[in-house]
């Protein structure tokens, strides 16, 4: 009799344990399902807001990235590559300046499709005819991007003057200006370094594949001060570095309103022409792991061979008729 009671008691305890297990299991499952449903709803909501919904909030100073550009077969490809980098760096405001009488629908469409309309500006500034390269001229024959970079500097100065005392400046420090050519390759890490530039400073770092070297870089002394550069091309320049290798604290632009690029300087001296207004070599701020990391490369896109296209055009046809390439 006692044995039967013990057996029944074991059965009851086992039954209760199973019920309790199933109860807690169902709660856990419901929570997982709700979480999955919530995550799915967030994705749907974010799709409605654009992919920017998944980017972190902007942290750090605004970086005005100035990109001169001109119409050519690879223009959209070059700008598309840059747009993908800029999308990943919410602190960047992109100033795209076209070498033309007016802005183009190609660039307008690109900014719109990349979701960068709210943090970009499209300008146009045409290079004077006497300084314009002809189709068969080598790209080094005349200075390029002068008119476009100066137009961007004009806009940035006016914009900064209007917004002096901005809360963002108080929180993160002054804005920064970087000349971001459309044929280079940039790591997102570069912009983390640019954001470290102090008020009143020009930041510098290495550039890969430029000037006939694997890397051009600032040379530092034991105390971390910039002594010079390892440039092999015209090392006698006051600042023998590439346009991609420096950025400027924007307060310097306001303090030096006459600092602009010039058509009148010798080949290779555009960087020196602008930097002479702001700093001396020894006072530049070394970045990118004390100038040991390469985060930007001076790449060039190969000019596409379009012989078949030219043949089509002679017959009044185009392979891209009605298409934007």
Image (cartoon, helix red, strand yellow):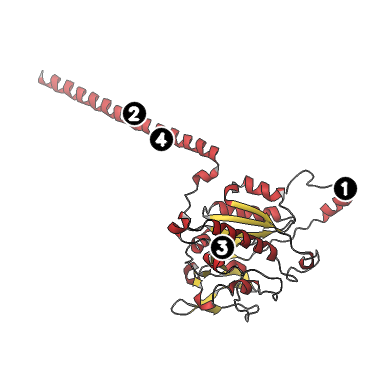
Q: Dividing the picture into quarters, in which one does residue 28 lie?
A: top left
Q: Identify the residue at image location x=49%, y=71%.
A: 285
> How many numbered circles does the render carry?
4
Q: Dividing the picture into quarters, in which one does residue 31 lie?
A: top left
- Secondary element under disc 2, as helix, strand or loop, is helix
Left or right of 165: which side holds 211? right
Q: Considering only order in the chain, which callout, 4 or 2, is on the residue closer to the N terminus?
A: 2
Whether residue 247 appears in this view of the structure is: no
Residue under label 2, please give it. 26
Against 288, residue 27 (above or below) is above
Residue under label 1, please give it. 316
Q: Spatial distance from mark 2 to mark 3, Cα to Cα?
A: 57 Å
Q: Considering only order in the chain, which callout, 1 or 4, is on the residue closer to the N terminus?
A: 4
**Residue 58 percent across, percent down from the top left:** 48, 52
Q: Kindly check if marks 2 and 1 are in contact, taking CB atoms under 8 A apart as contact.
A: no
Q: Considering only order in the chain, which callout, 4 or 3, is on the residue closer to the N terminus?
A: 4
Q: Nearer the viewer, mark 2 or mark 1?
A: 1
Q: Considering only order in the chain, which callout, 1 or 2, is on the residue closer to the N terminus?
A: 2
Q: Considering only order in the chain, which callout, 3 or 2, is on the residue closer to the N terminus?
A: 2
Q: Nearer the viewer, mark 4 or mark 1?
A: 1
- 10 Å crowding of disc 4: few (<14), some (14-19), many (20+): few
Name the mark on residue 176.
none
Residue under label 3, please give it. 177
Name the mark on residue 35.
4
- 10 Å crowding of disc 2: few (<14), some (14-19), many (20+): few
Against 183, residue 114 (above or below) is above
- Secondary element under disc 4, as helix, strand or loop, is helix
């Amino acid at each position: 009799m006692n044995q039967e009671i013990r057996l029944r008691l074991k059965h009851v305890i086992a039954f209760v344990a199973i019920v309790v297990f199933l109860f807690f299991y169902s709660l856990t499952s419901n929570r997982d399902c709700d979480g999955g449903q919530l995550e799915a709803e967030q994705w749907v909501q974010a799709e409605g807001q654009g992919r920017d919904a998944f980017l972190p909030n902007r942290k750090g100073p605004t970086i005005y990235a100035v990109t001169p550009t001109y119409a050519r077969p690879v223009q959209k490809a070059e700008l598309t590559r840059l747009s993908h980098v800029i999308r990943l760096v919410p602190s960047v405001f992109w100033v795209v300046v076209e070498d033309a009488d007016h802005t183009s629908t190609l660039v307008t469409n690109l900014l719109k499709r990349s979701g960068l309309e709210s943090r970009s500006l499209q300008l146009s500034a045409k290079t004077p005819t006497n300084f314009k390269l002809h189709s068969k001229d080598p790209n080094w024959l005349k200075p390029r991007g002068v008119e476009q970079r100066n137009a961007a500097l004009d806009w940035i100065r006016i914009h900064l003057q209007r917004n002096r005392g901005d809360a963002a400046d108080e929180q993160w420090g002054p804005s920064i200006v970087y000349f971001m050519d459309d044929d280079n390759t940039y790591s997102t890490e570069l912009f983390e370094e640019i954001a470290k530039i102090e008020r009143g400073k020009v930041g510098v770092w290495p550039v890969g594949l430029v000037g006939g070297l694997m890397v051009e870089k600032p040379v530092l002394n034991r105390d971390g001060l910039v002594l010079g550069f390892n440039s092999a091309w015209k090392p006698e320049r006051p600042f023998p570095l590439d346009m991609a290798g420096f950025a400027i604290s924007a307060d310097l632009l306001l303090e030096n309103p006459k600092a602009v690029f010039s058509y009148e300087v010798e080949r290779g001296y555009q960087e020196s022409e602008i930097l002479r207004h702001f700093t001396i070599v020894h006072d530049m701020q070394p970045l990118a792991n004390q100038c040991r990391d390469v985060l930007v490369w001076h790449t060039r896109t190969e000019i596409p061979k379009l012989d078949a296209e030219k043949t089509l055009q002679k017959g009044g046809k185009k392979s891209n008729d009605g298409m934007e390439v």
